[in-house]
Every structure is written in structure tokens, then in C-alpha cells.
Image (cartoon, helix red, strand yellow):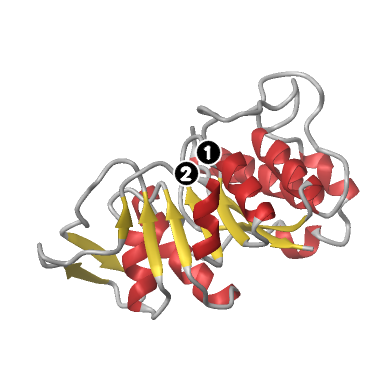
Amino acid sequence: MSKRKDRKQTEELFESVAQLAAGGPPGLPQTGHADAPIADEVLVHSKELAPVLVSAPPGLRQMKKFRFQLLHQWMLAHLQPGRVADVGGGKGLLAYLLRQSDWPATVIDPVSQALPTKFKDLTRNKQIHLSATETVPRLTQNFEPAMARDFDILVALHAHGCNIHLIEAAAQYNRRFVILPCCIIHEPIYPPLGVHWLQCVVDYATRAGFRVQPFRLNFKGQNIGLYGVPD
């Protein structure tokens, strides 16, 4: 896929998710695969949001491996600090970065992994090396709804099978959530024919009592996130 086509499809998807979060109709016609790109004409239904939301993030799109750094930057810029549960957090780089910014963060993942030995600081354009003894708090188990009681923000970055359960837990315990849904794997619901998975998630969260703000990070691939705040 060309860079131009990739960017165009991402922008179309972002426009549609933003429109759905604002209470408008889905932008995808009722045909085709649930992950198909969303048509440009969705802008017709989102005149107020389109001027603000359709523009791509500045600069060249980063590689997908930088998604943790980019989400960390976005959270610092847009959210009030709080105790973060990094659900499906893998090696724990996002949790590490948040803790370096004085946000309490814990990884919840059934697979125990060590932190990466190095990562790139995008702000300083510098490679950072981590000691083998460096760790982050970790719960080596599957996410359970009751865990939400101990956190303020539930985060899932491309975490398979966690999105709907995380929204339900956030609703039950009146917590905020930040998710970047990716593949539809082991989720308890599936989008109807013609409805994109992201749209399905936005609709579910809205019905669960959240105000949903879509946002976009500047990396390749599924870079659209959803920030949910209880009404």
C-alpha cells in the first residue's frame, strides 16, 4: 500500500470515528468487511468536527514501534495524571515512560516480560539504554474487572481481547479509559456487517455512559485511539 493511500484511509477512518463519538451516523455503508476503509462523504455529517479533526498529525509518520512513546506524549499533553493500568502492556515500555513522568503505572499482562534493553527518546532524538535490573510494577495475570478499583485510567494499546472488558470495568468503577483497538480477537461482541470495529467500540462505550474523544497518533498502522470519560 502506498504512503498516500495509507494516510488517506487512516484519515477517513478517523473522521468516521469522530463523527460517531459526536452522535452522528456511522460513515461506512452496510456492505463489505468490517475493517474496510470509511468513505470520504462521512465529512458531510461532521461539519463542526471536520476542520479540526481531519488533518493528519504533523511530520512524517513514525514507525509502529514508537507507538508507546507517542501515546505517552499524548497522555501527558491531554490527561490529568492518575494511576494507570497498562492492560496487555507487554514489555512495559509505556508503563516505564509514564513512571518516569511521575505517573503511577502498572502492567497487567499474563505473560511476564522484561523491559526492552533500549528505546528511542523521540523528544531528544536519543537512544536510551536500560539496565537489566530496571523493572516496572507488574501483575502477571489476565485483566479482571475488579482490578479497576485500584486505578484511575485503564489503558489498552493494541491489546487483543481486552477492549470491551476494559470498557465494562471502567463503567462499573467510574474510571477513565484510553484504548487503541486493533484486531477483533477474543472480544465478546463483533461488529455488524458494514460497521467498522472502531465504530462498534465507540457505540458500545457511548451506550455504557462515556463521552468518547477520538484521537490520532503519528505512527503507521492503526493509530486511532479512544479516550473515554464517564458522564
Can you name the residue that lies furthest to the left here?
A: 132
Viewer-nearest residue: 39 or 215: 215
Instruction: State which quarter of the image contains the C terminus.
Output: bottom right
> How far apart are the two marked residues, 2 and 1, measured between alpha carbons?
5 Å
Q: Residue at x 51, y 65 (%)?
A: 151
Can you name the residue that lies furthest to the bottom here?
A: 102
- SS at badge 2: loop
User: Few, some or many C-alpha atoms within 10 Å of disc 2 (few <14, some 14-19, many ≥20)?
Assistant: many
Q: Earlier in the sequence, mark 2 or mark 1?
A: 2
Q: Position of residue 221 (x, y in %)?
A: 48, 43
- In the image, residue 149 sits, relative to residue 9, either above or below, namely below
Q: Position of residue 19 (x, y in %)?
A: 81, 50
Residue type for callout 1: Cys
Regarding residue 61, the answer to whether it shows in the image is yes
Regarding residue 122, the answer to whether it shows in the image is no
Look at mark 1 in the image and give the residue it sits on: 182
